Amino acid sequence: MSKRIVILGGGTGGTLTANRLHRHYHHKAEIVVVDQDDHHVYQPGLLFVPFGLAKHSEIVRPRHEQLHRDIEFVLQAIDRVDLARDTVVLENGSELAYDVLVVATGTVLAFDETEGLTGRGWNEKVFTFYDLAGATGLAAALDEFEGGRLVVNVVDMPIKCPVAPLEFCFLADWYFTERGIRDKVDITYATPLDGAFTKPVASAALSSLLEEKGVHMVTEFNTGEVVLDDDGRAGRLVGYDGREVPFDLAVVIPLHSGAAYVGRSEGLGDDLQFVPTHQNTLQTKAKANVFALGDATNVPTSKAGSVTHFEGEVLVDNIIRFLDGKPLDEGYDGHANCFIETGFGKALLIDFNYDTQPLTGHFPAAVGMPLLKESRMNHLGKLMFQWVYWHALLQGRDIPGIGAAMPTRGKQAPTPDNEGATA
Ligand SMILES: Cc1cc2nc3c(=O)[nH]c(=O)nc-3n(C[C@H](O)[C@H](O)[C@H](O)COP(=O)(O)OP(=O)(O)OC[C@H]3O[C@@H](n4cnc5c(N)ncnc54)[C@H](O)[C@@H]3O)c2cc1C
């Protein structure tokens, strides 16, 4: 009898998983995708919206159109998963039974967790670019900004695409230079980390780049409250340790959590509503027939589309193994790969996994795109990626030379000071 695979979330991970499974099973399995809306946003494009470099129409497409026509799309919010009954309960009260469940519901932006964030001044002096409404509103605010203190702040980790706030700083430097008012704008990056990034070699490279571009860093800053001045013209971030960062315009990346239904599903999630998942097989700790990928998991690598893509390859293979009664493959090594836009038509590229931090060298082999080094080639790669996303990645096609396992050829050997022979 044909098996039913229910996929929760029709974003990056849910869509590519459904299409990959369909490529394997065709009509031999029933594949169902559930999502609460029908607008698939190409999230890396949100970075470009505030600077007038991407339009709404270019980065949003109907969700159901990204799925093969034989895949069933259910447009409904999820209320909870009943693990004991292998059933998903939807918000309208209907139920979906499954043989295998895939959790791909990403993250929620938890604005309310930071006092004052969405109070007075929200979407006037304080913005986010992590959703479409915020990115669009910020475009108008940047356009009107004639000078002053711009503060970019990450409230806490983990966030999706941890390099996107840095890219925002680099693009702001470029944007105000183009407008001829860079000398009137003071850009500050306030982060809870002790440097620009989590991994030492990349953190050092990115911290120097921020310095080079005149972006000040405030480190180990944990935002407790956002306060707007009485006249509403400016405000300040107040840290839990009492430090204050004043701003005329603030761009805040709020705390992230998993989807609320995870919290309502007994045994599925952790305290932050992320789903405890085996970091190599992508099988959840909740139950053997439940798998998870993308931002929704707790695996110790970046929350990124590239990670979701690489995880998807291993996860689909493991669902097939599971349904065939074979042992799972521990093949996901934490591979992550991110272009970092640095402004002026250039970008950096980083590539890493659970064991190897981002290193210098080239990707995907000794001849290729430069790693941890600004180049025009990387910028073109970042722009081209949008086409690859819609036409190859979401469709579940393999991308030649770029797969789940991190390539080591072309990379410098890891040493404390990053000097060494090419691996
Ligand atoms: C500004 C920005 C820039 C980024 N840049 C990059 C980049 O350059 N490179 C990169 O690799 N990654 C980047 N990312 C991250 C990347 O977009 C995400 O990591 C990726 O989309 C995660 O995929 P996902 O399937 O886990 O989640 P998503 O694609 O977010 O999908 C989750 C889906 O679940 C649905 N859902 C959630 N709760 C429910 C519910 N209760 N009921 C029904 N449906 C529900 C949502 O509607 C959504 O469609 C960026 C993200 C942002 C915000």
Image (cartoon, rainbow, N blue to C red):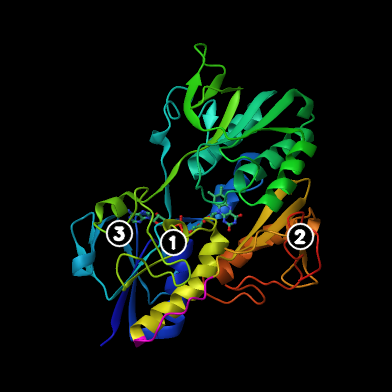
Q: Amino acid at mark 1?
A: Arg
Q: Is residue 50 above or below residue 317?
A: above
Q: Are marks 1 and 3 in contact (CB under 8 Å)?
A: no
Give neighbour class at mark 1: few <14, some 14-19, many 20+ (Cα, 10 Å).
some
Residue 164: assigned label = none
Q: Is residue 253 left or right of residue 149?
A: left
Label 1 to label 3: alpha-carbon separation: 26 Å
Give the extent of the magenta segment: 324-332
Q: Is residue 301 left or right of residue 8?
A: right
Q: Is mark 1 within 8 Å of ligand 1?
A: yes
Q: Is residue 333 above or below residue 380?
A: below
Residue 268: assigned label = 3
Q: Amino acid at mark 3?
A: Leu
Residue bearing the label numbered 1: 63
Q: Nearer the viewer, residue 223 or 317?
A: 223
Residue bearing the label numbered 2: 360
Residue 396 counted in the magenta span: no
Q: Is residue 52 visible?
A: no
Label 2 to label 3: alpha-carbon separation: 39 Å
**Front tag of 1 and 3:** 3
**Mark 3 falls on what kind of element?**
loop
Looking at the rendering, in which quadrant would you find the C terminus? bottom right
**Residue 213: horizontal and vertical position, in percent?**
77, 37
